[in-house]
């Protein structure tokens, strides 16, 4: 499997399962609808952690399992990943996120039709802040992603050789998948309450586009906020790469 295909499939699985848990606890007439706020949050953060785990399991051997443009940029800034491969990885991640979101939409289509609150439907696919303050929202996404990428440097295997790519290829192998899943789980439980912790530009932008396309005139994609979960995580990944390079 090529690195492009691995990133595409891994990100698609990640988003299908991640959106799936949010839809399961949010949309009308699902079996998990009506869960308590605490139980809902625990279920969402746990499932997202496991979704990352299995996305990494699928793609780790073939691409290093970045599954996130912020991770890719952070590795490149730290000189652990070739800049020439960055566009390919980010494109694969964005397209994979869109595929995962499209499958999740079709999977829960009956329950989407049964839900009258458009903001609830959008919330299954994209993130939004608990308190809308763009400066603080940006900082939340930047800081959360910084912790994700910076700590991944201590989890990821330092060298991963892939056919056709340089030996300096840096990524997450299958054996490192579980700690990364736990890390995402931890970030969700501790830092996710402000902006729903996108911490991944592809995770938010891809599904937001799919939501807007599928809902048509009914859609309320909130484009005014959409730049936060894209630029905030990218800034966090960049700063994490710089910090790791400076310190180590």
Image (tube, helix red, strand yellow):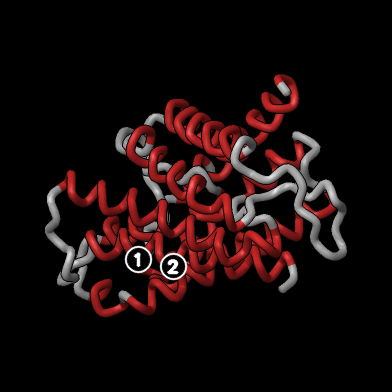
Mark 2 residue element:
helix
Q: Classify residue 201 as left or right of residue 79.
A: left
User: Is 247 above or below relative to 93?
Assistant: above
Residue under pointer 1: 20
Crowd tier of the residue under label 2, counting other residues whose Cα lies within 10 Å: few below 14, some 14–19, many 20 or above:
many
Q: Classify residue 47 as left or right of residue 201.
A: left
Mark 1 near mark 2, Cβ–Cβ under 8 Å?
A: yes
Q: CA distance from mark 1 to mark 2?
A: 6 Å
Q: Classify residue 76 as left or right of residue 240.
A: right
Q: Give the quarter of the figure containing the C terminus.
A: top right
Q: Which mark is residue 126?
A: none
Crowd tier of the residue under label 1, counting other residues whose Cα lies within 10 Å: few below 14, some 14–19, many 20 or above:
many
Task: Write the residue at 46% across / 49% down.
Answer: 181
**Residue 72, percent across and down?**
68, 47
Task: Write the residue at 19% across / 70% down.
Answer: 30
**Residue 214, percent across and down?**
43, 73
**Residue 84, percent across and down?**
85, 52
């Amino acid at each position: 499997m090529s690195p492009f295909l691995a990133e595409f499939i891994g990100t698609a699985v990640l988003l299908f399962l991640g959106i799936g848990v949010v839809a399961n606890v949010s949309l009308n007439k699902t079996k998990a609808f009506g869960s308590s706020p605490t139980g809902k949050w625990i279920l969402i953060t746990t499932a997202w952690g496991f979704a990352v785990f299995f996305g990494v399991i699928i793609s780790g051997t073939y691409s290093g399992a970045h599954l996130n443009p912020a991770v890719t940029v952070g590795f490149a800034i730290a000189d652990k990943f070739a800049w020439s491969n960055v566009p390919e990885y980010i494109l694969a991640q964005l397209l994979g996120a869109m595929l995962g979101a499209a499958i999740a939409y079709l999977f829960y289509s009956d329950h989407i039709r049964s839900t009258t609150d458009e903001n609830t439907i959008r919330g299954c696919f994209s993130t939004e802040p608990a308190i809308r303050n763009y400066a603080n929202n940006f900082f939340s996404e930047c800081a959360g992603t910084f912790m994700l990428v910076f700590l991944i440097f201590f989890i990821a295997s330092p060298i991963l050789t892939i056919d056709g790519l340089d030996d300096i290829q840096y990524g997450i192998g299958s054996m490192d998948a579980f700690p990364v899943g736990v890390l995402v789980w931890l970030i969700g439980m501790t830092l996710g309450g402000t902006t729903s912790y996108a911490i991944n530009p592809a995770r938010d932008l891809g599904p937001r586009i799919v939501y807007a396309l599928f809902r048509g005139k009914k859609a309320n994609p909130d484009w005014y906020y959409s730049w936060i979960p894209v630029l905030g995580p990218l800034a966090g990944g960049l700063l994490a790469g710089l910090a790791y390079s400076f310190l180590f």
